[in-house]
Image (cartoon, coloured by chain):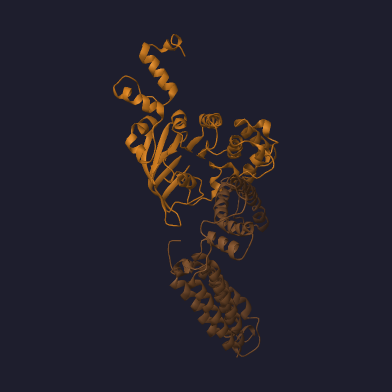
Amino acid sequence: MIRAEAIEFTYPNGFRALQGLDFHIKAGEFVALIGENGAGKTTLLKLLGGLLKPTAGRLLVGGLDTARVRAVELARRVGFLFQNPDHQLFLPTVREELAFGPKNLGLKGQALEERVAEAAAAVGLTPYLEVNPRQLSKGQRQRVALASILAMEPEVLVLDEPTTGQDYREALEIMTIVQKLHRQGHTVLCVTHDMEMVARFADRALVLGAGELLLDGPLATVFAREDILAATGLLPPQAVQLARPYWEAGLLPGVLTVEELYEAIITALRGEKDARQVLPA
Amino acid sequence: MPARSFLHELNPLTKIAWSLAVITVAFVFQQPLPLLGLWASVLAVALAGKVLKEILPAIRGLLIFAAIFILFQIFLIQEGNTVFTLLPGSGFGRVTDVGLTACTMLALRMLAMTSTIPVLLATTPPKDMIVAFVEKLRVPYVYALMLVTSLRFIPTLQEELGLIIQAQRARACDLESRNIFRRLRAIVPLALPLLLMSVQRARTMAISMETRGFGAGPRTSLRTSTFQTLDLGVIAGCLFLTAALVIIALR
């Protein structure tokens, strides 16, 4: 679905944000893009959305060369959710806001109405269709922005820190929606600083540091390389850190989330899966 | 301000006095050559203050502006002898010697006058400018702050606009349409978020200033604005030179 061939990007001011990345993301993957601030995560996302063009190398999305296709064309395939929803919300009601993208793609009448209704339902905003987006909470506005992208029915969802500035419940809600979309077949690429969210939702992680791809692989492999993660200012999730010595000693299997750790401990203690019932919660 | 020089040491008002002196001299001379000299003197001051390289982009912009200015004016002056015509024999696009001199004079005058502004801005921290205005010229602090803050926010707004453009392009908003009406309509999805965010930013800023005691009472500055011997010397020099040049020009 997404293929990067030695892509580089240098900003007009001379800053080399990306220095030769190679990777391949298959259709239907859920990939987390992690790394410290300034590592090039947002730049990479913008290249995917065709908002910036690589200064060297090739970036293909669904067979389209992002350097050749106009951003408007690419918008059909790649849905880009920005960090701050306020950069895009400008219409008086949620309904009109959701209709803006598909309208730009040429949809009208019944088809347009259906798209809007579907997108609103997908993020749980159906009761808010006639409300002014500016009156909603930050988390709700982020969901409006996400729905406005969904209404364009892109195959790839590119999310730039979709959970910033939201409380745990709101963040979990939006990530659950993203997970649901992923299960429906969307390819997801998500930038986040929240390792717990990565562990809980992604299948694979790309680790960026100073414009280079430091790690690329399944979460368990990536989180095992604490040395490389530390180089770009990252720590594995607490559950992984906690379980690591026991895993190395062969006492516990590899775990990613608190739930998995709990399951593993119970099993290890009682040697049977149903032990949870006899132990106090 | 990384590059320290005598220009950086001067009181902002001294630099404004110099700027006014240059403007006065630029108006009394009517020939291109002295005006060229005047412009050269402004650039020489920038060089001495080690900011010439820094202000070159601004100077380049002013040069483009001057060129456009000449282009618009030069064909309108019909007096004097023909130097050349754009379409020979037709009389269309006639350029005369009088027109050429007048346009060069006007362009150089504009250049000399406006080139002092980037020099002033490059050598003066905005904060010093506020203090000088408030303490020496008795400008109310709020007005001085408004002026400097609005200048300060231009790059921030540009950055914000860049993000908004990208966000709307990602929603298939066609900003490069050939159709002029469509293009005008495409301003709305850009202008509205920018406006709304600016209002919000202004509110946040007002609150954050109030929480830090803005407007709580008489205001004092950490560094006060002072005139040193150098300032007095420069102002006296500017006055003397301006007077001398005015007398020479008008005689």
What is the count of numbered marks? 0
Q: Position of residue B191 (x, y in %)?
A: 64, 52
Relative to A132, does residue A259 appear above or below in the rendering?
Answer: above
Q: Residue furthest left?
A: A249
Residue closest to the eye, B15 or A3: B15
Relative to A172, does residue B241 appear above or below in the rendering?
Answer: below
Residue occupying image coordinates x 63% and y 78%: B73
Residue B146 located left or right of residue A220: right
In the rendered structure, the colour chosen for chain A is orange
Q: Position of residue B160 (x, y in %)?
A: 56, 51
Residue closest to the eye, A64 or A56: A56
Q: Position of residue B142 (x, y in %)?
A: 63, 56
Residue A250 located left or right of residue A107: left
Residue A38 located left or right of residue B221: left
Q: Identify the image quadrant of residue A240.
A: top left
Residue B84 in view, yes or no: no
In the rendered structure, the colour chosen for chain B is brown
Residue occupying image coordinates x 42% and y 18%: A263
Residue occupying image coordinates x 63% and y 63%: B138
Residue B176 located left or right of residue B119: right
Residue closest to the eye, B37 or B96: B37
Q: Residue furthest top?
A: A278
Residue A32 in view, yes or no: yes
Q: Quadrant of the C terminus of chain B?
A: bottom right
Q: Position of residue A188 (x, y in %)?
A: 49, 36
Q: Identify the image quadrant of residue A227.
A: top left
Relative to A128, does residue B162 appear above or below in the rendering?
Answer: below
